[in-house]
Amino acid sequence: MPVRPTEPVPPVPAAHRRGRAARRRRREDLAGYVFLSPWLLGLLGITAIPMLLSLYLSFTDYSPLIPVTESQWIGLDNYRRMFTADPSYWHAVRVTVTFALIAVPLKLAAALAVAMLLNKTMRGIALFRGLFYLPSLLGGSVALAIVWRGMFSGDGAFNAFLSIFGIEGKAWVNDPTWALPTLMLLAIWQFGAPMVIFLAGLKQIPVELYEASAVDGAGAWRKFFHITLPMLSPVIFFNLVLETIHGFQGFTSAFVLSNGTGGPVDATLMYTLHLYKAGFVDLNMGYASAMAWVFLLVVGLITVVLFNTGRFWVHYSDSEER
């Protein structure tokens, strides 16, 4: 039986191919938006819309006791009061800046020191890494702050330890001079998260650099300042940005240690605690919204400054410009 020759398939027009490709891309885009919809709804309902509403409320005298529609527009009065008529505001700024300038560098130094000690290969080293990271797992928990307040109270464990050496302690959390350092100590003790990041960075430093420097007669300090720190500078920069933002956001520990007052004598009145008191204790939510927006702008400005100055001291292992 003779075989009939197959007829050639006519080519699909280019316009038709482009149309099918466009319809396929639209279906893929639609599927992507469907999967993203929970996150987009959360972004709008929990973040974007409340932020815009708080920006509007910062120009009003809004109180939670009245509907938003009944609040009166007062323009920049909340911002004028903040900068010129509220002495507690500037005290909270000083306390927060002092906390960040002292606690953040000490926390990073402790994290780097412990990471270098744990950057070894030996039996049981994973257990030690987990134990040092454990305080960061608790984070800003209320329970941890309560335990810390009990430890540094007049009859707490710290004073019991000092009594072994014949040293008379004091109620550290109730002393205006020592309340903020006690709060800083709690923040420094939670160095586990930056420690893990430093440890990962130390693992990436080539061992050959240390071996070559040892052949040249370099000591431990020279290796640290000329190899470890330059090679670790991107990780230091990353931790610095995160911990600086976290330092300015401190709230839970200050709230628990002072029973929500910022005491003693406003010694632990952090910015966020003062904001909380303005909005939820004094019920002046318009003023609290203004404080929140100033806080957002200042933290954003600090982050921009860190990024702009980072190029002068952050060194990368390749020649690509960051």
Image (spheres, rainbow, N blue to C red):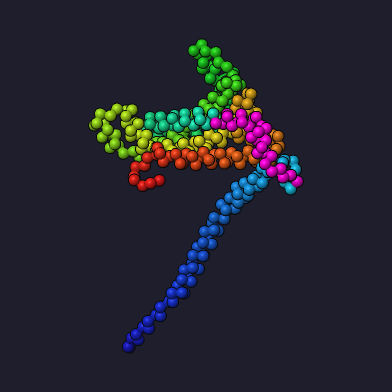
Total number of numbered labels?
0
Q: Is residue 67 left or right of residue 226?
A: right
Furthest residue to the left? 215
The answer to whether any part of residue 202 appears in the image is no
The image quadrant that residue 239 belongs to is: top left
Q: Position of residue 87 (x, y in %)?
A: 65, 29
Give the dominant element type of the magenta stretch: helix, strand or loop: helix
Q: Position of residue 282 (x, y in %)?
A: 70, 34
Q: Residue drawn at (57%, 29%), measured in percent from left and top?
A: 94
Q: Is residue 278 magenta?
A: no
Q: Is residue 71 magenta?
A: yes
Above or below — where is 55 with respect to 195? below
Q: Position of residue 1 (x, y in %)?
A: 33, 88
Above or below — where is 175 with respect to 2? above
Q: Residue drawn at (43%, 74%), measured in percent from left and top?
A: 14
Furthest residue to the top? 166
Q: Residue drawn at (50%, 62%), measured in percent from left and top?
A: 28
The magenta stretch is 70-97
Which residue is nearer to you in this view: 18 or 163? 18
Q: Is residue 16 left or right of residue 179?
A: left
Q: Residue drawn at (36%, 42%), measured in percent from left and top?
A: 316
Q: Position of residue 254 (x, y in %)?
A: 59, 30
Which residue is nearer to you in this view: 281 or 93? 93
The answer to whether any part of residue 293 appears in the image is yes
